[in-house]
Amino acid sequence: MARLKLGVMISGRGSNLQALIEACRDPSFPAEIVLVISNSPDAQGLARAKQAGIPTRVISHKDYPSKKDFEEAIDAAHKKAGVELICLAGFMRIIGPTLLARWRGKMINIHPSLLPAYPGLDTHRRALEEKALHAGCSVHYVEEEVDAGAVIIQAKVPVEPGDTEESLAARVLEQEHKIYPEAVRLIATGAVHYKNGHIQHRKEESHA
Ligand code: GRF
């Protein structure tokens, strides 16, 4: 079985990258990470990738005259590595038209809220301020509008009395680490398919 080739893009800690690395260690998992790109040379996630023997590239937006040039470089690196699906995992730059034109339907992101609630930053603070009863996380396809593409999978957690941003973030993060590999598995096995901005689900085949 050919495994789907993943390119993971990070900017920082890389705990979701780590969850993907762990999932890919299982030979029966239908995907493998062939490249990790960080826009920051200091991203902790780079060390995680190196530790796992995965090729890394630092492609900093600061080294390019325009967003278009920056994204051309990212695109070229993914293509050279044979990437088939890009996974944004805490990548802190907004994806522009150059990358989207080439990777729409082949680029997914993990976001720490139950989209469409709380797109953007500070999701947990906003959920607490609004006294939300639940929080959670979503894996979705990437479109022009930030955190707005079709949702592949979500996980919901309760907001507990006395929660702080940190305690809520930790509860959600635990779920992020479960649903990101699961989203990749759904795509890699063809159970989920992207078409014209929407998600199609393949009916489970009967094993009878
Ligand atoms: C996660 O909360 C993810 O949902 C968001 O950025 C954070 C990245 O964390 N997009 P990590 O770098 O994967 O630890």
Image (spheres, helix red, strand yellow):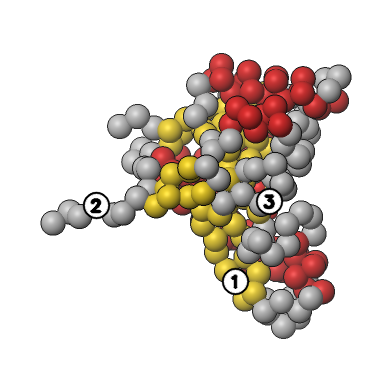
Give the structural element (helix, strand or loop) at label 3. Answer: loop
Per the image, the residue denoted by label 2 is: 205
Q: Quadrant of residue 61?
A: top right
Q: Is residue 81 above or below residue 104?
A: above
* Amino acid at the residue labelled 1: Val
**Label located before the other in sequence (3 or 1):** 3
Query: Is label 2 within 8 A of ligand 1 (CB to nearest ligand atom)?
Result: no
**Label located before the other in sequence (1 or 2):** 1
Q: Quadrant of residue 30?
A: top left
* x 48%, y 43%: residue: 194
- Residue 50 visible? The answer is no
* x 73%, y 57%: residue: 119
Q: Nearer the viewer, mark 1 or mark 2?
A: 2
Please state if 26 lies on the left or on the right of 180 as rendered: left
Give the structural element (helix, strand or loop) at label 1. Answer: strand
Q: Position of residue 166 (x, y in %)?
A: 75, 65
Near-viewer residue (182 or 149): 149
Near-viewer residue (207 or 33): 207
Q: Position of residue 27 (x, y in %)?
A: 36, 38
Per the image, the residue denoted by label 3 is: 147
Which residue is the extreme one toward the front? 196
* x 37%, y 43%: residue: 190
Q: Nearer the viewer, mark 3 or mark 1?
A: 3
For the C terminus, which image quadrant?
Answer: bottom left
Disc 3 residue crowd, few under 14, some 14–19, many 20+, Cα 10 Å: many
For the N terminus, which image quadrant?
Answer: top left
- Residue 31 visible? The answer is yes
* Amino acid at the residue labelled 2: Glu
Give the structural element (helix, strand or loop) at label 2. Answer: loop
